[in-house]
Image: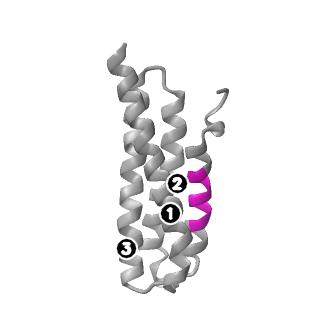
Amino acid sequence: MKSYKELIVWQRAIELVKEVFILTALFPKSEVYGITSQMRRAVVSIPSNIAEGYGRRSLAESSQFHSIAYGSALELETQLIIAKQLRLAKEVYFEKSEGLLLEVCKMLNVMTGKLRQFKTSI
């Protein structure tokens, strides 16, 4: 693999960024510096940390950045739940973001597990 851009998990995370930006654009303007800003920062952190982890020289460092990406994904999940419960947008608008987030979380779990296995087998 020549680039982090070839990682399916990174590609899905980029799709997730787009979806969350579309979703949060529907939120009330009063939330622009509140949950909208928090969700956008959390979602941008996911592919950013995947890319940074890919660029690290050691497995331990790579694993650390993938763990940070996973933490940001869980942060976003919580924010999606809050925004949905507060009815900041119609429920149907959350579905694509929630589906992509679930997919990204599963891939990050697998990736982190494989890195740990590889690290312990060395």
Q: Residue furthest top?
A: 122
CB within 8 Å, label 1 to label 2: yes
Q: Secondary structure at mark 1?
A: helix
Query: Within 10 Å of the Cα at label 2, are there few (<14), some (14-19), or many (20+) other Cα atoms?
Result: many
Q: Secondary structure at mark 3?
A: helix
Which residue corresponds to mark 1? 40
Q: Residue 80: x, y in percent?
A: 42, 71
Whole-angstrom CA distance, mark 1 to mark 3, is 15 Å
Amino acid type, residue under disc 2 in the picture: Val
Residue 89, relative to residue 32: is it above or below?
A: below
Query: Within 10 Å of the Cα at label 1, are there few (<14), some (14-19), or many (20+) other Cα atoms?
Result: some
Which residue corresponds to mark 3? 81
Amino acid type, residue under disc 3 in the picture: Ile
Q: Residue 31: x, y in percent?
A: 45, 79
106 inside magenta stretch = no
- Magenta extent: 12-19
18 inside magenta stretch = yes
Q: What residue is at 52 percent from the left and 73 percent from the top?
A: 95
Which residue corresponds to mark 2? 44
Amino acid type, residue under disc 1 in the picture: Arg
Query: Within 10 Å of the Cα at label 3, are there few (<14), some (14-19), or many (20+) other Cα atoms?
Result: few
Residue 2, relative to residue 44: is it above or below?
A: above
Whole-angstrom CA distance, mark 1 to mark 2, is 6 Å
Q: Which mark is in front, 3 or 2?
A: 3
Q: Quadrant of the C terminus?
A: top left
**Residue 2 visible in the picture:** yes
Q: What residue is at 41 percent from the left and 62 percent from the top?
A: 76
